[in-house]
Amino acid sequence: MEERGILVDTTILEALGKELDARIETIWLTLADYNTNLDSPQQVAKLLFEDLGIIPVKKTKGKTRWSTDDEVLTKLQLAHPIITFIREYRGLVKLKGTYVTGLTGAVDVDGRIHTTFRQTGARSGRVSSADPNIQNIPSRDAFGSRIREAFIAALGFAFVGADYSQI
């Protein structure tokens, strides 16, 4: 599997990347009045907890500032509509950078991704994937499903997912 690689339709990834860029830009424009860098946890914390007066939930691991991680934002979801946009923005940026851009950059000249499979990478004994990790692609949201559509089985073949713990 490593040597042969997995065929990838980069046009699907490129189209998805453009859609993600458009939605990310829409969120930026929607929140432009707040004048906050959504990529900066410190600025997001200042916006939420100082400027908007939302009561913080917990501090970061270093206990130096208020946390704005996804767990916190999920708990604060109803406190202000802006939180929905921040969570969506972060999710889209991760999908774009990690999966769309990352996978596109990993496609070899043969149009395939040659990941590394490891039998010792997971404590469960399952085979894991690295460089790039193609096992973490989200499957529960629309964009994640569309990323998965970019992987193409060769003619006459099919992809099969097998998990021995579920047998």
Image: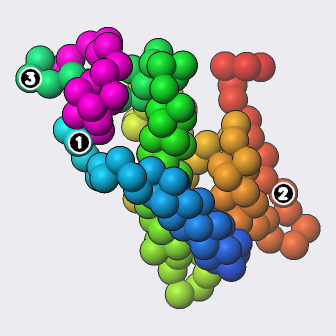
Residue that label 3 marks: 64
- The kind of residue tagged 2 is Ala
Cβ–Cβ under 8 Å for marks 3 and 2: no
Q: CA distance from mark 1 to mark 3?
A: 14 Å
Q: Is residue 87 visible?
A: no
Residue type pointed to by label 1:
Gln
- Residue 50 on the magenta segment: yes
- For residue 158, the mark is 2
Report the magenta residues as a range: 44-61
Residue 87 in picture, x, y percent from top left: 49, 38
For the question of whether residue 122 can be seen, the reply is yes
Q: Amino acid at mark 3?
A: Thr
Where residue 92 appears, x then y in whole percent?
A: 53, 52
> Is the C terminus in the top left, top right, bottom left or bottom right quadrant?
top right
Which numbered disc, 1 or 3, marks the residue that appears first in the sequence?
Answer: 1
Task: Please tell me whether mark 2 or mark 1 is closer to you in this view.
Answer: 1
How many C-alpha atoms fall within 10 Å of the one at disc 2: few (<14), some, or many (≥20)?
few
Count of marks placed on residues: 3
Mark positioned earlier in the residue sequence (3 or 2): 3
The disc at residue 43 is 1
Q: Secondary structure at mark 3?
A: loop
Q: Are marks 1 and 3 in contact (CB under 8 Å)?
A: no
Does 40 sit left or right of 34 as displayed? Answer: left
